[in-house]
Amino acid sequence: MTTDGRWGLLDAAGNTIEASGEPVVSEVTDCAEDRPTLYVGPLITHYGHFLFGTFARLWPLLTWDGPKPRLLCHPLGPPEIRRETWAALPFLIEILSRFDMTLDDLATFERPTRIPRLMVPGPSLREQDFVHDVHGTLARFVGQPFWDPALVDTESRPVYLSKTRLGTGISRLRNEQVLCEALERGGVDIVYPESLRLSQLVRLLSERRMVLGTAGSAFHAAVFAAPGRRILGLNWAAHINANFLLLDALNGTQARYYSAIGAETGEEAGFHFDWSLPDPTAVAVEMLARARAFDTLDTRDAEEDAVRRHAGRVSPLQRVGRWLRRQI
């Protein structure tokens, strides 16, 4: 790894296997300890991107035979705060612990180093592209101790996963607080995923019969939870990121995604973008109605679409019902 953050992995003949930016070609100065080593790529500190990047290289650990390997990664950030940064990631510690590993099993090299025994696995998942069955096996192995089969779906009160307390992230719903207040009045518990450990979030998803929220990284925890989770997601646009569909398919997650007609996007400090609802209270009412009718949503959506097509207009009662548009 170079001082400007570029990194590279080369084979014995000098051919690039993995690299960031310009290929890193330097004279080898060091030789690592002769110990089995598993390459896991960049260690991504963002929870959602970690699950689609670093985590997707861990699948060989499921059947690893012999001495425990160290995990070779390319770290982000300066060396002096690296350990501190990793220690502040509970999801990383919990996932490593499932393989009887700790932060001490993570290996990085600051200078060109020869690694005697190195396994370089292909990823079990690639963002918006593909996922292999082994990724689901990996997630189920990690999540297995986090939920109790006897408690699955025992809590009928819906829960909404809110981003209102997030300081940074990918997207932010500007008037989400109004939406949350309306949902809470309708009998929904409001939970802030960033305040929970991965194990706590997985347990919550497993025990609740109905989970609501804006489409985001918190929904990715469903792949670790009990199969068949029911999720009602509110999206910023009329198309859903393929990442959600890839993970939903692995664990039988019954997710339905909707977008609000008239939603607007903009810029927000600390986020890639923000968006807003034209009437968050009306959206909350419709989300509650759809949560109650979740098992017949496909039929309901098809009937509403048919009425809308044949009538050529939307009646006053249906107007609120059309605040949410079914994702294709």
Image (cartoon, grey):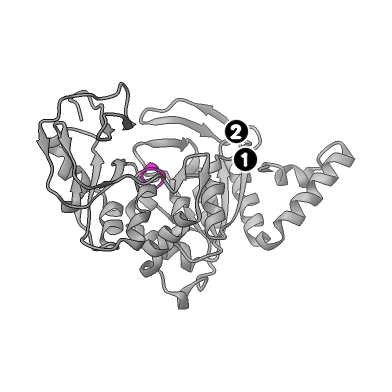
69 or 218: nearer the viewer: 69
Q: Position of residue 257 (x, y in %)?
A: 61, 47
Residue at image location 46% in from the left, 62% down from the top: 205
Q: Position of residue 191 (x, y in %)?
A: 42, 55
The residue furthest top is 22
Q: Identify residue for label 2.
A: 263
Q: Quadrant of the C terminus?
A: top right
149 or 186: nearer the viewer: 149
Q: In the structure shown, which secondary structural element does the residue marked by tag 2 occupy?
A: loop
Asked whether disc 1 touches disc 2, contact meaning CB atoms under 8 Å apart, the reply is yes
110 or 117: nearer the viewer: 117
The residue furthest right is 310
Residue 28 included in the magenta stretch of the image: no
Q: Position of residue 18 (x, y in %)?
A: 33, 33
Magenta-colored span: 49-53
| Three-letter residue code for mark 2 | Ala
Q: Is residue 129 above or below residue 144?
A: above
Q: Which mark is residue 259?
A: 1
Residue 50 included in the magenta stretch of the image: yes
**Looking at the image, is mark 1 or mark 2 nearer the viewer?**
1
